[in-house]
Amino acid sequence: MTQPSWTRAAVPLLHRPVTQHAWEDVVFAHWRHEPESLQRLVPRGTRPDVVDGSAWVGLTAYVFRETRVPPFPSAGRLGTMTEVTIEILTVDGEGRRGVTYRTVDTDNVPAIVAAHALLGVPYTFAHAGSRRRGDTVAHRSVRHTGRVRHPVRWVRSLRQERPAETVRPRHAASVRVTAGDPVDTPLAAELTTRAGIHARYLAQTLFWQRQHPPLVVRSARLDRLDGDLPDAVGMPGLFDREPDSLLVLDGTTVRYAWGGVVR
């Protein structure tokens, strides 16, 4: 029997949490896609999750605060960051409905190192920031591809004041929305309440369980969406049309734990 989407995140963690975070000012933007067009982009043992007749690709952007690695206390400012992600909604053979990140862009270097080494989540260095004024929420991420690929050379190029075109930014994403009224529909719950993360790690596909209280999401009006970040992760043209679903979450607390090997 399929588990109701709004109860997925209430399932008790199978293991002790490995991380805990406060999520704030979350923007969920989702686009409909044909499942066949996404199959090559998801890990072995998973497939694009078909919801309301479509597979879905998402841009999710948010602020992480109060990051903890139990049993240690909050990391304070070191655990605060903006993350801008491109993701695909996925499901595995056991029916666990999660997300597969194509990228998680942030400027928090410890998080990047830990995610690659331990979780298999494709974090990428970018200058990322957020702003909120009333009901208007904005997030932006700008990669410097030179620094991502060759960090030492990138710093040297800045010190030597090479021409601007040799160090100009590439692969950016910018989104600004204005939140509206609460939304309580099965589709909104399916798109925002996922049981965990499907991640490639070496030759395996891992599942990391996600737990949080029931989400109270709001509708949103799109004020701005631009950038070429989708081009870098195999989804060119994603931002050429407005999202088919646009939602905002003011905040929640999220815990992650080991969920098992998919295959």
Image: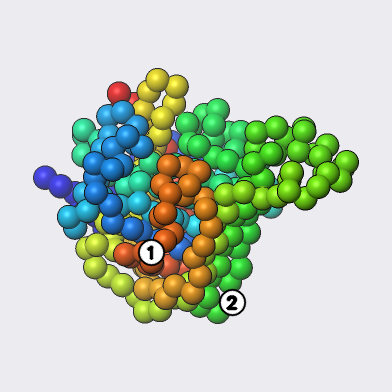
Q: Name the residue under label 2.
A: 133
| Residue type, numbered disc 1 | Arg
Residue pictured at 72% horizontal, 35% vertical? 151
Instruction: Please tell me whether mark 1 sits on a helix, a strand or a loop.
Output: loop
Q: Tell me where residue 246 sits by quadrant.
A: bottom left
**Residue 31 point in image, percent of width and height:** 33, 58
Instruction: Please tell me whether mark 2 sits on a helix, a strand or a loop.
Output: strand
Image disc number at residue 249: none
Quarter of the N terminus within the rendering: top left
Residue pictured at 27% horizontal, 29% vertical? 45
Residue pictured at 38% horizontal, 72% vertical? 218
Q: Which of 154 and 138 is in front in this view?
A: 154
Quarter of the C terminus within the rendering: top left
Alpha carbon distance from label 2 to label 1: 25 Å
Q: Mark 1 points at which residue?
A: 241
**Residue 9 point in image, percent of width and height:** 32, 51
Q: Is any part of residue 177 visible from this angle?
A: yes
- Most distant residue in the right direction: 160
**Residue 12 point in image, percent of width and height:** 32, 44
